Amino acid sequence: ELADRQVEVEVTRLLSLRIIGIQESGGVPNHEASIAKLFTSELGQRLARTAVQILGMHGQAPTDLPGNKWSQAYLRTVASTIAGGTSEIQRNIIATRGLGMPRG
């Protein structure tokens, strides 16, 4: 599972570099930004969930204990899939603008 998260972090980095490249060439990263937002916000959930699983019961302990921020991070990552457009909205943008599918 850790190897999967490492690969996903690298994918996120490459998506970010692609968006930077589009912007530097004067383009507007339309559906590309939606792909990055969707992938990154859902990756945040997977990373936090993996950390909580690795830590076991310690990962579920109250966040005021020293060194335990993962249970709070796990709870916060849900908001990241809503802020800036829900994951479903991002998928619709990718389908219509990126893949040219009809609305609906």
Image (tube, helix red, strand yellow):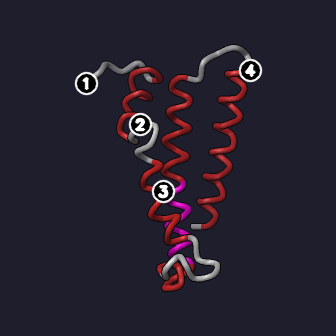
Residue ID at (64%, 45%): 11
Q: Is mark 1 on a helix, strand or loop?
A: loop
Residue ID for mark 1: 104
As drawn, the residue found furthest toward the front would be: 64
Q: Is residue 82 left or right of residue 58?
A: left
Q: Principal SS element in the magenta part?
A: helix
The residue type indicated by label 3 comes to Thr
Gap in angstroms between the C-alphas marked 3 and 1: 28 Å
The vertical placement of 65 against 69, above or below, is below
Residue ID at (63%, 45%): 12
The residue type indicated by label 1 comes to Gly
Residue bounds of the magenta highlight: 44-54
The answer to whether residue 47 is magenta is yes
Pair 4/2: label in front: 2
Q: Do the residues labelled 1 and 4 touch (CB within 8 Å)?
A: no
Residue ID for mark 4: 24
Residue ID for mark 3: 77
Label 2 or label 1, whichever comes before in sequence order: 2
Mark 1, residues whose alpha carbon is within 10 Å: few (<14), some, or many (≥20)?
A: few
Label 3 or label 1, whichever comes before in sequence order: 3
Residue ID at (64%, 52%): 9
Query: Dividing the picture into quarters, in which one does residue 78 lie?
Result: bottom left
Q: What element carries label 4?
A: helix
Pair 2/1: label in front: 2
Mark 3, residues whose alpha carbon is within 10 Å: few (<14), some, or many (≥20)?
A: some
Tag shown at residue 85 = 2
Gap in angstroms between the C-alphas marked 3 and 4: 30 Å
Q: Is mark 3 on a helix, strand or loop?
A: helix
